[in-house]
């Protein structure tokens, strides 16, 4: 059969693919003089009387999608009795061709492709479009100067073909049996097909990329039956080197019940990304240490001793014995002592700055220990004694505000990546996209029902905002003075600001260019994908935060003193490193309650959306989280919710800020 050389205004250049539904040509649009990919359906698909209308309706829905990882649809039409779709022409291989050529891919190579496809699917699902035929043959992969680029094609084609008489006359199955979700494999469950079916197919694609095969090979009814009824073979049977956590993520994504799968495609891929980084802590740590070490040597060469000490503290938090850092820091201390004996320098030390740098060092201590629940070794970076007075012989370091900001382009790929906010010197930590079980079945009624929430990646302050930081906003004329700014019990520079209303907290976050965290973001940063009861784990330990002393556990003995935490009221931020959360945030249990962005409603969880919830649209009260120095252990649970009027100012109430991952 001679292939057509022209269809409507499209001049056929060559054939680039052919399948059971259509042939794909590289063609030239003679009206606009551009090269396109022209998908021409086989004639027998058009036999149904309403097919053309259905086909164009689905093509228009696909054409409305605008995403860098979704192929652009230019036009859907008919010419000479043939239905076609004109799409952007994308040079490269299909993912199917890549896998046939190379077999199983290592996780670090598979992830960039999976991340782009996952982003495309979540975007399409948000627009109300379900693909229904996610498979490697519908993913175009190309290598560019910016790295690998993956693009998903053929949105809506399967749905358009539903009801065509060709399904019967040709004996053709819609979709691809090897990638069909259980609800898609059963004709009687057609009404259940939704975004979860696409996520299942993405799980099959990931399974194939990592093992070199699909779990249920074949394109027969037996394949469909296996998807519905047979357990998925563990991926490690085919590739033993796959980490157990990766296998667990794959099997969760391939659960038979749609509700048991990940709540979003991005949450699935984020779990794989976290596992990759957890499997290579040495490589990840070295990637952070090398640039810091290079900057330290450059600072030493120009005798910038404050910078040497700051960078050295960051390095030693990651690796206390790294190269010659200890010697360089001692050299810097001698240089500073010599300078102090001379004229007063422009950099005058402040207790607040010293404490902020201590926080910075403590923050980085957890970058590569996000998944562990053990206390880190103590490091000599805390500049505040337990009493709140300056330590007797503090190390000579620079205020955090003089640090050079890390590039804002640092990708949010792992929990605990840090940056320094130049406006107020706050250390911020990254929280990758993921999902968790929000709420508590054993908690208060307003913490129920427990529900799965998926979140995009974001940044959150490593500690609560301090008095010294808040004073900068007051001095700038933006923030109102805190209620207890002159109270000796609460006014230390390194202590969390208290006596601020929700409006005050919101104004501060806007002043530094960010926002208050949502309630879901706060809880996820505190308890992580494992949904622990407290930031450090499921068991209460009153030595890991600042709580009411009545919270000490029976028979718990605190070495060297009375009480459980050593503080009568608030404590300097960051002095309980053992209480860090999975992503390195500090003080999320105890010290002060923290305002978040959401309005409060007792029954909100019963109607909360499953992706990036932002709270009810109305309500007189706002939410605070985390408990305080004056509250017992139950209030310090990550799931505990407290509602208060936004104009309330208490000695137990402060805040921290957050921002998106852009």
Image (cartoon, helix red, strand yellow):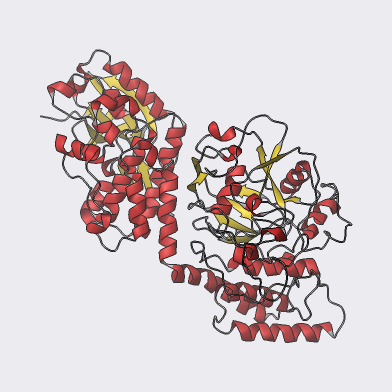
203 left or right, relative to 658: left
Q: Is residue 569 visible?
A: yes
508 left or right, relative to 63: right
Where residue 413 appears, as percent x and y from the top left, is 49, 56
Spot the residue most to the top. 49
In this view, 407 is above or below 322: above
- In front: 465, or 63? 465
Which quadrant is the N terminus positioned in?
A: top left
Q: How many marks?
A: 0
Q: Quadrant of residue 211?
A: bottom left
140 left or right, relative to 475: left
Where residue 655 appears, as percent x and y from the top left, is 71, 50
Q: What residue do we see at 36% from left, 36% from top?
A: 258
Q: What residue do we see at 52% from left, 34% from top?
A: 609
Where residue 384 appears, as percent x and y from the top left, is 75, 71
- In front: 283, or 256? 256
Where residue 98 appears, as percent x and y from the top left, is 26, 52
- In front: 60, or 568? 568
Q: Is residue 92 visible?
A: no
Spot the residue most to the front. 555
Q: What residue do we see at 30% from left, 39% from top?
A: 256
In this view, 517 is above or below 383: above
Spot the residue most to the left. 1
């Amino acid at each position: 059969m001679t292939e057509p050389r022209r269809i409507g205004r499209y001049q056929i250049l060559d054939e680039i693919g052919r399948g059971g539904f259509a042939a794909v040509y590289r063609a030239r649009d003679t009206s606009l003089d551009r090269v396109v990919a022209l998908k021409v359906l086989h004639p027998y698909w058009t036999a149904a009387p309403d097919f053309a209308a259905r086909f164009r309706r689905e093509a228009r829905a696909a054409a409305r999608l605008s995403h860098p990882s979704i192929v652009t649809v230019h036009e859907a039409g008919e010419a000479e009795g043939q239905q076609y779709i004109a799409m952007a022409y994308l040079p490269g291989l299909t993912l199917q061709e890549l896998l046939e050529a190379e077999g199983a891919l290592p996780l670090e190579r598979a992830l960039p492709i999976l991340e782009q496809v996952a982003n495309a699917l979540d975007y399409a699902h948000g627009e109300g479009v379900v693909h229904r035929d996610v498979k490697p043959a519908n993913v175009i992969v190309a290598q560019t100067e910016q790295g690998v680029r993956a693009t998903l094609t053929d949105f809506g084609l399967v749905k358009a073909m539903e009801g065509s008489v060709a399904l019967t006359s040709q004996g053709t199955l819609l979709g691809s049996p090897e990638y069909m979700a259980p609800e898609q494999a059963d004709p009687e469950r057609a009404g259940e097909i939704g975004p979860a079916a696409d996520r299942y197919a993405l799980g099959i694609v990931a399974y194939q990329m990592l093992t070199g095969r699909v779990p249920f090979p074949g394109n027969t009814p037996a394949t469909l039956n296996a998807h519905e009824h047979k357990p998925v073979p563990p991926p490690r049977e085919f590739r033993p080197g796959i980490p157990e956590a990766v296998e667990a993520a794959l099997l969760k994504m391939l659960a038979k019940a749609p509700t048991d799968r990940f709540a979003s495609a991005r949450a699935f891929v984020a779990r794989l990304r976290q596992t990759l980084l957890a499997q290579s802590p040495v490589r990840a740590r070295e990637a952070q240490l090398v640039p810091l070490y290079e900057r330290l040597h450059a600072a030493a060469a120009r005798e910038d001793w404050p910078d040497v000490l700051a960078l050295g503290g960051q390095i030693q938090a990651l690796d206390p014995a790294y190269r010659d850092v200890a010697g360089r820091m001692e050299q810097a201390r001698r240089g500073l002592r010599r300078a102090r004996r001379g004229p007063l320098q422009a950099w005058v030390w402040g207790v607040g700055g010293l404490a902020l740098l201590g926080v910075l060092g403590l923050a980085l201590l957890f970058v590569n220990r996000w998944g562990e629940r053990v206390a880190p070794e103590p490091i000599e970076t805390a500049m505040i004694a337990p009493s709140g007075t300056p330590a007797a012989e503090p190390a000579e370091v620079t205020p955090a505000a003089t640090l050079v900001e890390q590039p804002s382009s640092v990708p949010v790929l792992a929990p605990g990546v840090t940056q320094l906010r130049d406006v107020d010197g706050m250390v911020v930590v990254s929280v990758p996209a993921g999902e968790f079980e929000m709420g508590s079945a054993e908690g208060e009624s307003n913490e129920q029902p427990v529900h799965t929430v998926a979140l995009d990646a974001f940044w959150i302050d490593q500690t609560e905002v301090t008095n010294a930081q808040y004073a900068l906003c007051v001095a700038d004329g933006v923030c109102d003075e805190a209620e207890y700014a002159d109270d000796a019990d609460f006014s230390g520079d390194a202590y969390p600001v208290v006596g601020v209303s929700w409006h005050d907290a919101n104004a501060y976050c806007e002043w530094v260019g960010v926002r208050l965290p949502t309630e879901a973001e706060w809880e996820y940063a505190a308890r992580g994908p494992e949904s622990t009861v407290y930031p450090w784990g499921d068991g209460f330990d009153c030595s890991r935060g600042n709580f009411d002393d009545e919270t000490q556990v029976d028979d718990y003995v605190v070495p060297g003193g009375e009480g459980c935490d050593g503080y009568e009221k608030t404590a300097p931020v960051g002095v309980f490193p053992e209480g860090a959360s999975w992503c390195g945030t500090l003080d999320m249990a105890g010290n002060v309650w923290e305002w978040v962005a959401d309005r409060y409603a007792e029954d909100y969880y019963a109607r909360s959306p499953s992706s990036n919830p932002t709270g009810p649209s109305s309500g007189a009260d706002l939410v605070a989280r985390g408990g305080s120095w004056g509250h017992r252990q139950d209030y310090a649970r990550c799931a505990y919710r407290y509602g208060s009027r936004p104009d309330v100012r208490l000695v137990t109430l402060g805040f921290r800020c957050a921002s998106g991952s852009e």
